[in-house]
Image (cartoon, rainbow, N blue to C red):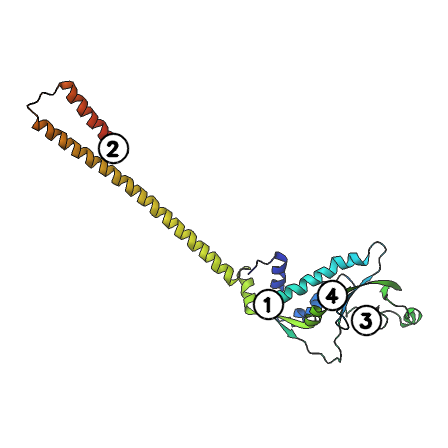
């Protein structure tokens, strides 16, 4: 399994927390997406072609492309990540049944606005009906209230034809149900079962390597001791041979200086053997 980013781990942790607290509403995809919308709304169609509509209040110093880049891509990231969690069996998606004849394919703050699909208008709660009677025929308008004043502003819209509309249609009105494996992943400090097995195997390999190195060191020391014993035995055998030779040849005359050199050589050889 690939490693999740810190942002992705935060999403998993939050989903698990919602489940454990029993907040099923917070596990609905649509509210989760709406919470992350800094644009006004996101709408999509699947027929006759898949396309996504991005709505944002008009700003003189900001283009619709900038609003799209800032927020629309984050929606894509979230939806694709949820789909990956489904594939990895971290979560299941539970479809929310609807009594409406047609699925509402739009995300916006429904607690704050109402949406007129015929005119692409967003009307904030509290807007005076008389104000709407004067300006209500204009397309792509946002009617809002600021203080005691009612205002109208243009809406910038970008149409993005792409297959992401199918992804939104499939996931937008579902509940994300974290499975026990997701809870365990969070409980274990964001380590999966595979991760923990890999860590255990690494620890086992390290312990085995340490034991092997210690065995090699012990064998090397034993070899040194064996070499020393071998050299001492050779020296002892050499001494026995020499003294035996001297005894056999006692009738031969050995000069004093030759005998002294022989003894010195034997002593030097014995000393070198012991120090090795």
> Based on the displayed image, in which of its 4 quarters is residue 182 positioned?
bottom right
* Direction from residue 27 to residue 192 in the image, left or right: left
> Based on the displayed image, in which of its 4 quarters is residue 108 positioned?
bottom right
Nearest to the eye among marks 1 and 4: give it.
Answer: 4
Labels 1 & 2 near each other (Cβ < 8 A): no
Q: Which residue in the structure is indicated by mark 2?
A: 273
Q: Percent x, y for residue 150?
A: 88, 65
Viewer-side residue, 165 vs 25: 165
Q: Percent x, y for residue 124?
A: 83, 68
Quarter of the image for the N terminus: give it: bottom right
3D distance between C-alphas at marks 2 and 4: 85 Å
How many numbered dots are placed on residues in this image? Answer: 4
3D distance between C-alphas at marks 1 and 3: 35 Å
Circle 1 residues within 10 Å: few <14, some 14–19, many ≥20: few
Say which element carries label 4: loop
Say which element carries label 1: helix
Pick whichever of labels 1 and 3 is earlier in the sequence: 1
Say which element carries label 2: helix
Q: Percent x, y for residue 116?
A: 83, 72
Residue at the (67%, 65%) spot, across then down? 79
Quarter of the image for the C terminus: give it: top left
Which of the labelled discs sits on residue 162, or is there none? 4
Residue 108 in view: no
Which of the labelled discs sits on residue 114, or is there none? 3
Residue 264 in view: yes
Labels 2 & 3 near each other (Cβ < 8 A): no
3D distance between C-alphas at marks 1 and 2: 71 Å
């Amino acid at each position: 399994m690939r490693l999740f980013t810190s942002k992705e781990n935060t999403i998993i942790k939050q989903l698990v927390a919602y489940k454990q607290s029993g907040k099923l509403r917070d596990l609905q995809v649509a509210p989760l997406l709406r919470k992350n919308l800094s644009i006004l709304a996101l709408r999509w169609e699947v027929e006759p072609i898949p396309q996504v509509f991005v709505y944002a209040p008009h700003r003189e110093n900001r283009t619709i492309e900038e609003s799209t880049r800032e927020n629309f891509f984050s929606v894509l990231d979230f939806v694709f990540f949820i789909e990956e969690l489904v594939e990895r069996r971290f979560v299941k998606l539970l479809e929310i049944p609807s009594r409406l004849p047609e699925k509402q394919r739009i995300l916006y703050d429904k607690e704050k606005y109402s949406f007129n699909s015929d005119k692409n208008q967003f009307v904030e709660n509290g807007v005076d009906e008389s104000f709407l009677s004067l300006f209500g025929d204009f397309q792509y308008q946002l009617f809002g209230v600021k203080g005691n004043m009612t205002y109208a502003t243009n809406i910038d819209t970008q149409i993005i034809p792409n297959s992401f509309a199918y992804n939104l249609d499939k996931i937008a009105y579902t509940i994300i149900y974290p499975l026990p494996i997701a809870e365990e992943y969070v409980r274990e400090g964001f380590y999966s079962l595979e991760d923990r097995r890999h860590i255990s195997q690494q620890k086992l390999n390290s312990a085995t390597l340490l034991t092997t190195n210690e065995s090699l060191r012990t064998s090397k020391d034993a070899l040194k001791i064996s070499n020393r014993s071998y050299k001492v035995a050779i020296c002892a055998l050499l001494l026995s041979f020499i003294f035996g030779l001297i005894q056999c040849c006692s009738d031969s005359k050995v000069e004093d200086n030759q005998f002294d050199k022989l003894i010195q050589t034997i002593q030097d050889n014995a000393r070198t053997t012991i120090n090795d």
